[in-house]
Amino acid sequence: MLRSTLRRRLVPALVAGLAAVLIDLAAPTAWAVAPTPVNLNSSSCPTKIQQGESDGCVTELQKLLDQHGQSITVDGSFGPSTYGAVRIFQSQSGIAVDGIVGPRTKQSLYNNSAGGLPGPVNLNSPDCPATVQQGQSGGCVTELQNLLNQHGATLVLDGSFGPATLTAVKSFQSGAGLSADGLVGPATKNALYNGTSSIPAVDLRSPSCPATLQSGEIDGCVTTLQTLLSAHGQHLAVDGDFGPATLTAVKSFQSGAGLSADGLVGPATKAALYRDVGSGTSAPGPINLTSPSCPANMQQGERDGCVTELQNLLNQHGASLTLDGIFGPATASAVESFQSDALLPVDGIAGPHTKAALYNGTIVLVGCEIPDGMTECATGDGMAARAVNLAHYYYDAPKSASQAADQVRLKQRYGFGTVGAIPYVWGGGHGGSPGPSYGTCQGYTGAIQPCPAASTKGLDCSGFVRLIYKMAAAIDIAPGGGGTNQEIKNAHLHAVPRSDLRPGDLIFWGAGTDNTDHVAMYLGSEYVVTTDNSASPLNPYSPPLTGTGPAVIEAWFTGSHVGIHLLSQHSRPPVGYYHVKG
């Protein structure tokens, strides 16, 4: 089984909507008494700070990581959570991901930090404009950049809405099926928050809520309603919108409570909703599990708002827990059940991986896919071999339950269960981050008309190899979304003679190395190709179509999908062969 580490949205994240419903008894901050921070560039700190160190240098490191959105406990001890946060920061910053804080990582940590980085501000708060756009700066932009990174971008958090942020916004909008105008309005904000709303919850019994809530209302009263319905086993997405799903849940709850199932939330329904929440007592208000106020590893016996949040998230994933803020046997059992379903180690402890899966449906470590038996992204000369391994893992028919499960995850993440199901799209995969996207009809001269690129998500040749190497090594060989001419000049690519060609290398075609128009990934010299692709009249291949010999995997022409072909099917000679390495 592969452990997915891409920051893609697979399931809706839960809004902490109980804050106004239940009394906030949040636990005191978990920031322990730590050694006095020491500037990382001072002579008191080692050139390379790494796991196992405990001193003021680590205190400073943790504070800087926190300013960059990592939300870790500041205790001066470089443990597993700090190591993971360093790796995430390095991945976001385009630095080699090794978990060691050397000169380059230190420099990036201090860039736009230490007071220069505005603290994040929720995009739906009154402090943020209705539309966040290029040219603006401040905490709203910091929050925007952080959210974009959670959806796969690799922005430096600087609180400034510049060209890179604009490109990332447009890429996200395109991938989310929104108008790619670069303007972060209500729809884009909602999608960034994983399809949920962060409208603050309002107690249903307060004067701010109508006597009777009904379908069509969108506000904090509905946020509270949905949270309470979830607490009673309805498992709703909490988005503050009283739509059809909420209406059905209300009627179901009313029927089960012996009330008239009319879908109107009046005094009797409100009273029933509040009854028995927290076993008759007020549970602590929910606290985001990744905040410094929550322990890195939550386990049975804990009582606080972190557990309230954990229980609410577990209910969103199918549990039926009473929200009481107490990590008892039922909560432990629900954690184990979730871990089993999420293909995580089943230990009943809500640690960083379990928390990340609860919020995102995927383990957040770094931006690559890690096969079993390995602990990090491919580096150096290992990049090419890992790329081939992953191409086969996601292209071939599954040979195990874990491979089938990972292909299901791929489909959830990108919309395609296998690499071979990804259609060729002119300009596809050229967004701010690697992955299938809508393409462009500019310059399109294909036989299929009208041009399908604007309405089809997929990859073109450069978009495909860009995605494969992102999955293998957490690198982007076309930052910003350029094509073959950008990729061939990437620092990770090194020209090799034809005689040194090995699996995972990239082969380019065109008029020359400064004017390329196609790229494919080499699979090997004695490769058996059994699929005949000659049925399509749009097919540009030259015989032979099947046989044994040098082969490539590629996205080639409109009307086809990513496929494996004999190199001899290309009638033109390549203009260059390139090995990809760190």
Image: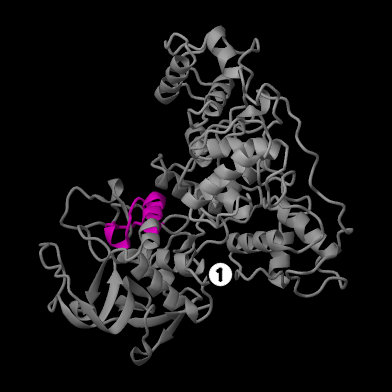
Residues shaded magenta: 406-430
Residue 198 seen in this snapshot: yes
Mark 1, residue position: 376
Please state if 231 lies on the left or on the right of 535 as rendered.
Answer: right
Element at label 1? loop
- Residue at coordinates 17% horizontally, 70% vertically from top-left? 531
- Vertical relation: 262 (above or below) 462: above
Q: Residues within 10 Å of mark 1 (few under 14, many from 20)?
A: some
| Residue 350: image location, x then y, percent | 63, 49
- Residue at coordinates 57% horizontally, 46% vertically from top-left? 335
- Vertical relation: 348 (above or below) 512: above
Q: Nearer the viewer, residue 506 or 27?
A: 27
| Residue 509: image location, x then y, percent | 29, 76
Residue 135 seen in this snapshot: no
Q: Nearer the viewer, residue 34 or 552?
A: 34
- Asked if residue 302 is among those painted magenta in the image, a careful observer would answer no
- Residue at coordinates 81% horizontally, 69% vertically from top-left? 41
| Residue 152: image location, x then y, percent | 51, 54
| Residue 503: image location, x then y, percent | 36, 81
Mark 1: which amino acid?
A: Glu
Q: Quadrant of the N terminus?
A: bottom left
- Residue at coordinates 68% horizontally, 52% vertically from top-left? 297
